[in-house]
Amino acid sequence: DAGITQSPRHKVTETGTPVTLRCHQTENHRYMYWYRQDPGHGLRLIHYSYGVKDTDKGEVSDGYSVSRSKTEDFLLTLESATSSQTSVYFCAISGGQGFGNTIYFGEGSWLTVV
Amino acid sequence: AQRVTQPEKLLSVFKGAPVELKCNYSYSGSPELFWYVQYSRQRLQLLLRHISRESIKGFTADLNKGETSFHLKKPFAQEEDSAMYYCALMGYGGATNKLIFGTGTLLAVQP
């Protein structure tokens, strides 16, 4: 299962509240990613990290922030949740070229904003 | 621009029929392409990568640079193949490599 754990797996929250999703890996991989999956859009990259405290924006980063204070943890925060952020969120990890550039995914976090 | 196009949202076939899931890409340079599969409400799993030129679960995919395509094929579909299939391109830019996904094709194999 590529040693990736996402929490919480399911959450219902109210509009305007902050929400934090956590991704934890046991593979000591350098790269970590947050994607969201929506019907008709496939998976879209929100933010990614290329090392501790090194992060950058993906294609749909508005309304999201991330932090990575340790190699194993990558947090995604919705500062003030909106209904448009109802989605399935997938964390992913990669060791980079030395690991064949393969990206492995977590099991997903289902977020509903009401 | 880096882009992956999967023109079919749904592909329905009967068990035993051949399957071809289409994928076209736009990328300047030598692409790295992948197929991921997602069974109902599960994580995405790597199915194939073009560099490996392998066959997994009877599926194959050949990179055609002239047609900028990476279609996924299987000669005889099985009911357990029913799933969402995503084609993805490894894009390089910024500080790391990133997967760029198509919108996915739902494969439904009828008994």
Image (spheres, helix red, strand yellow):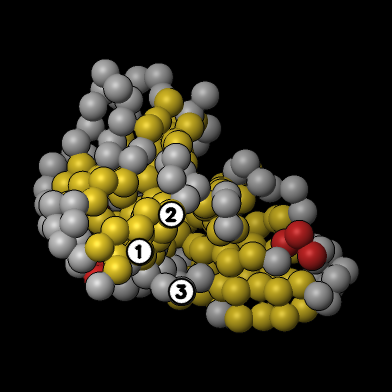
Which residue does the image show at 41% across and 24% down from the upper left?
A: B27
Asked if badge 2 and badge 1 are on a common chain, one would say yes
Q: Is residue A17 above or below residue B35?
A: below
Marked residue chain, label 2: B
Query: In the orientation shown, which residue stands out farthest toward the right?
Result: A16
Q: Position of residue B24 (x, y in %)?
A: 37, 32
Residue bearing mark 3: B41
Q: Are marks 2 and 1 in contact (CB under 8 Å)?
A: yes
Q: Position of residue A7 (x, y in %)?
A: 56, 78
Amino acid at the residue labelled 3: Arg
User: How many residues crowd mark 1 within 10 Å: few (<14), some (14–19), many (20+)?
Assistant: many
Marked residue chain, label 3: B
In this image, A88 relative to A24: left or right?
Answer: right
Q: Position of residue B58 (x, y in %)?
A: 13, 57
Helix, strand or loop at mark 1 = strand
Which residue does the image show at 60% across and 74% down from the upper left?
A: A110
Q: Specify the label residue B22 is tagged with.
A: none
Residue bearing mark 2: B10
Residue bearing mark 1: B108
Asked if badge 2 and badge 3 are on a common chain, one would say yes
Figure quadrant of the C terminus of chain B:
bottom left
Amino acid at the residue labelled 2: Leu
Eye-nearest disc, 3 or 1: 1
